[in-house]
Amino acid sequence: MKMRGVLGGCALAVGLVFAVPARAQNVGASIQGTVTDASGQALPGAHVTVRNVGTGDARELIADMTGRFHAPLLSPGE
């Protein structure tokens, strides 16, 4: 009986040592897009503001050389 308890404890200890940490889940979303003018041409360096109308939080972005922008890890809201 004692041997089974010792082996079980060792197995548990080894399992804890080699356990892979779980990745946390993020709550939220991201927005991405391309800024263009009326003719459809990309606007590099355009300033983009992503605003949560419920909380008033805002994130300022600048479009890249192809007019693209990406706002990751946004809080839930409108």
Image (spheres, rainbow, N blue to C red):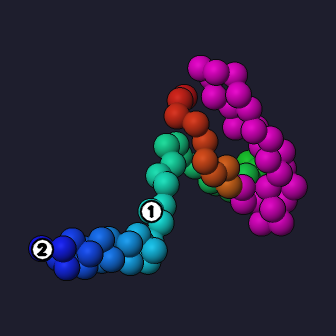
Q: Is residue 35 visible?
A: yes
Quarter holding residue 64: bottom right
> Which secondary structure lies at badge 2?
loop
> Which secondary structure lies at badge 1?
loop
| Rendering coords of residue 9 (x, y %) | 30, 71
Q: Nearer the viewer, residue 28 or 16?
A: 16
Q: Residue at x 33, y 77 (%)?
A: 10
Q: Which residue is mark 1?
A: 22
Q: Residue at x 83, y 66 (%)?
A: 65
Q: Is residue 52 magenta?
A: yes
What label does residue 12 carry, if any? none
Q: Is residue 35 above or below residue 16?
A: above
Q: Is residue 32 above or below residue 19?
A: above
Amino acid, disc 2: Met
Q: Nearer the viewer, residue 46 or 20?
A: 20
Q: Is residue 6 above or below residue 47?
A: below
Q: Is residue 20 left or right of residue 42?
A: left
Q: Nearer the viewer, residue 35 or 4?
A: 4
Amino acid, disc 1: Ala
Q: Residue furthest left?
A: 1
Q: Quadrant of the N terminus?
A: bottom left
Magenta-drawn segment: 42-69
Q: Residue at x 61, y 48 (%)?
A: 73
Quarter holding residue 55: top right
What label does residue 1 carry, if any? 2
Q: Is residue 43 visible?
A: no
Classify 10 Å Cα crowding around label 1: few (below 14), some (14-19), many (20 and above). few
Determine the CA span between mark 2 and mark 1: 34 Å
